[in-house]
Image (cartoon, rainbow, N blue to C red):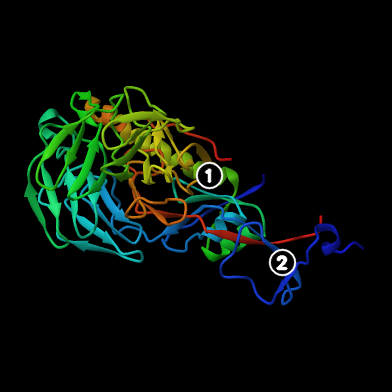
Amino acid sequence: MSEYKGIKGFQVQTRTENPSEGIVGDFYYNSTTGQFKTIGAGVGTWASGTNTPDNRSLYAGFGTATASLMVSGNSATAIVDLNTSYNGTAWSELSEINLGRSAASGFGTTAAGVVTGGYDGAVPAPSAYKTNVEEWNGSSWTEVTNQPEMQTESGSAGSQTAGLIFGGGNNPGLTAKTKSYNGASWTEVNALNAAKNRSMGYCIGTQTAAMIAGGDTGSITNQVEQWNGSSWSETTEINTARFLSAGSGSQTSSVIAGGRQSSNRYTNTELWDGTSWTEANDLATSRSYNVGVGSGDGSSANSSTQLYAAGVSGPSSTANTAATEEWNIPDFEIKTVTQG
Amino acid sequence: MAYKYCTATNWGKNFFTHEERKMFHLSGHPGEVWVVGDNLYGDQWISKVSGAIKTKEEAQAIVTGEIEAAQTAYDALSAEEKDKAGSRPVVYNLP
């Protein structure tokens, strides 16, 4: 029998236990188990997370997978003003927002957040669309400067003192407008290339590096646009056109999952590496009308846990769920080498 | 791929784990119906969650019933509400 050293020119390292940190491509012999092992790239999957206290969709969400807020939104029968916090383990109710609303946008952290826009009527008549903005300081909500105009169901990114909203609906139409927020006032900046709404599940990026994928441009789109702080440019499209999906991460590393197209509700997950989208393992249950949150700085969705809570699951637009799923890609995976 | 079918209530954290998702197919459907890959790991998961085994036909009947109820609810919406809710739910077949 040939020896590995004779074939490869070096000996196989022997270890008594599997390493806690590994380099993809490493190969070794575990003398304790008597098995050869390889270290491969981590494979991302969804696991069930802690159920939310109530079934809710169309909420504003922001923060990280271990420190996030789920604010207001729709229960199965009504708009609620609840403000529910997640600490990575459990959900808890905090001070309620002043104006309960549906389909609002949110950005910031659990210590300093913003909720803006939305509508407060069960049927979104023009009068139900709101421009109200509220800031969260970690313990209470304060009404601050309204949005200059109606812009709801918009994408959002950034922090309480450097926020951004983009696209959305301005009943009865769509808007491509982008507005920045500095903690005191709103400024209109360059618009998206295409008007689109129903993208409020996105909290991807910062005021100077944001991203929007999919949405409703009058038809369901797979368009993706990136913001560089001054203008939007189109980039590689997602594989599955969808709207009302959730996304998290950054311009260079993000996740998009779920959403819907016509009557189809998706479990599809796609990963963005800054250049292209790759199909990944699906959600266990389809969901839409929810928000994804991940690393607070939006730095890397591919190496940190992402949280996709509640939303609508199943075939009905009112079938709200409390189920939550958490995405994670481990840095590496150890595999046992078996004889072929 | 062969599947098993069961109903089980998702209790939240650790109802299904990252590791389990790598070992067998798992998809959730209306009516707390779960389609589970037919292998040892899938069997272990059904046992863990105290899943009530169903035949494919039984599982499909539960899902179809849930969707038909959603269709009835959708049909009762006003035109504006339907516009906001999107398309009427459609019955689909389990794998």
Within 10 Å of disc 2 (Cα), the crowding (few <14, some 14-19, many 20+) is some
Residue in the foreground of this view, choosing between B87 and B56 = B87
Q: Image quadrant of residue A10?
A: bottom right
Residue type of the residue flagged with mark 1: Ala
State the quadrant of the N terminus of chain A. Answer: bottom right
Mark 1 belongs to which subunit? A
Name the one closer to the observer, A214 or A165: A165
Q: Residue at x 23, y 38 (%)?
A: A165
Residue A188: give x, y in percent of width and height. Answer: 16, 32
Sequence-wise, the earlier of marks 1 and 2 is 2
Name the residue rendered at 23%, 29% in the picture.
A190
Q: Residue at x 28, y 49 (%)?
A: A56
Q: Residue A2, relative to residue A258: is it above or below?
A: below
Can residue A80 be seen by looking at this rendering? no
Protein chain holding label 2: A
**Label 1: few (<14), some (14–19) or many (≥20) C-alpha neighbours in 10 Å:** some
Q: Residue at x 12, y 34 (%)?
A: A128
- Determine whether B65 is above or below A138 in the image: above
Q: Position of residue A279 (x, y in %)?
A: 53, 40
According to the picture, the residue beneath numbered tag 2 turns out to be A28
Residue denoted by label 1: A280
User: Judging from the image, what secondary structure is the residue with disc 2 in?
Assistant: strand
Residue extending farthest right:
A1
Residue B73: quarter of image:
top left
Q: Nearer the viewer, mark 1 or mark 2?
A: 2
- The image shows residue A154, relative to residue B30, as above or below, that is above
Measured along the vertical axis of the image, is residue B95 above or below residue B43? above
Q: Horizontally, is A7 left or right of A252 in the view?
A: right
Q: Position of residue A333 (x, y in %)?
A: 60, 60
Give the amino acid at mark 2. Tyr
